[in-house]
Image (cartoon, rainbow, N blue to C red):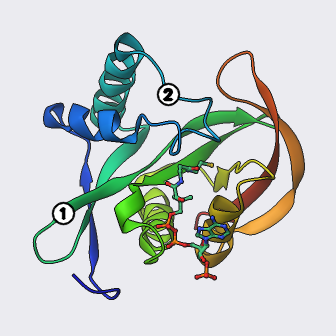
Amino acid sequence: MTEVDAICLRPWAEGDLGLLRAQNTAEMQRHLGGPVPEDELLDRHRRYTELSAAGNGCMYVVLLGPDSVVAGSVGYWEKEWGGRTVYEAGWQVLPEFQGRGVASRAAAAVARIAAADGDLKALHAFPPVVNEASIAVCRKAGFELAGECDFEYPKGTWIRCEDWWTPLG
Ligand SMILES: CC(C)(COP(=O)(O)OP(=O)(O)OC[C@H]1O[C@@H](n2cnc3c(N)ncnc32)[C@H](O)[C@@H]1OP(=O)(O)O)[C@@H](O)C(=O)NCCC(=O)NCCS
């Protein structure tokens, strides 16, 4: 596998619970509220599967290279923001595949998909102000910085985030 290995996005499917488990570590969830118990992972898995079926957004598994190795996840979903309905994007790349542009390319790809498949006019991402890697992903994927905001994630926890966005179409 090389740094120029292509990525490919595949919609989230029933067999992808193992990826959620692999991502459920203290390191990967440091900016996302920390690891969650198995029942919450199962809920997340169900939501991801249903989101892809419902058509108001989609979660994807990010596959890397000629062998389609599972490298992470990316997706977009509806979010009420500033009195409007927009799309929100999120991404996670497993530690062994980080630093190769996987998240940046996946984020740019999801913006193209949301523009082509979705009805809404803006895609936002809300990286915590301390998550330099995710902020760099926004910049490299072509999002623009709108400013800072307080963002609730997980429910009941407010964190200082940057609001990055890109117009869709
Ligand atoms: C954020 C994350 C998805 C980045 O994945 P990735 O595939 O390594 O990202 P890329 O390779 O596309 O790198 C994008 C940029 O981030 C930079 N970057 C990566 N890790 C960094 C770090 N720890 N600190 C600062 N910048 C970092 C890279 O250098 C690159 O910029 P450059 O090309 O200008 O050097 C990954 O670190 C991750 O999954 N973290 C845990 C989950 C998470 O925090 N998700 C985002 C929630 S808001």
Q: Give the percent coordinates (x, y) of residue 156.
A: 74, 15
What kind of residue is marked 2? Answer: Pro
Element at label 1? strand
Quarter of the rendering containing residue 40: top left
What kind of residue is marked 1? Answer: Val
Quarter of the rendering containing residue 8: bottom left
Residue at 50% across / 27% down in the picture?
35
Residue with the mark numbered 1: 69
Locate ligand 1 by image quadrant. Answer: bottom right
**Left or right of 6: which side holds 67?**
left
Q: Residue furthest top?
A: 39
Image quarter hosting the N terminus? bottom left
Residue at 60% across / 36% down in the picture?
32
Image quarter hosting the C terminus? bottom right
Quarter of the rendering containing residue 53: top left
Residue with the mark numbered 2: 35
**Label 1 CA crowd tier, 10 Å (few <14, some 14–19, many 20+):** some
Residue in the foreground of this view, choosing between 26 and 77: 26
Which numbered mark, 2 or 1, is in the foreground of this view?
Answer: 2
Residue at 42% across / 58% down in the picture?
95
Q: Give the percent coordinates (x, y) of residue 145.
A: 81, 65
Q: Give the percent coordinates (x, y) of residue 52.
A: 31, 38
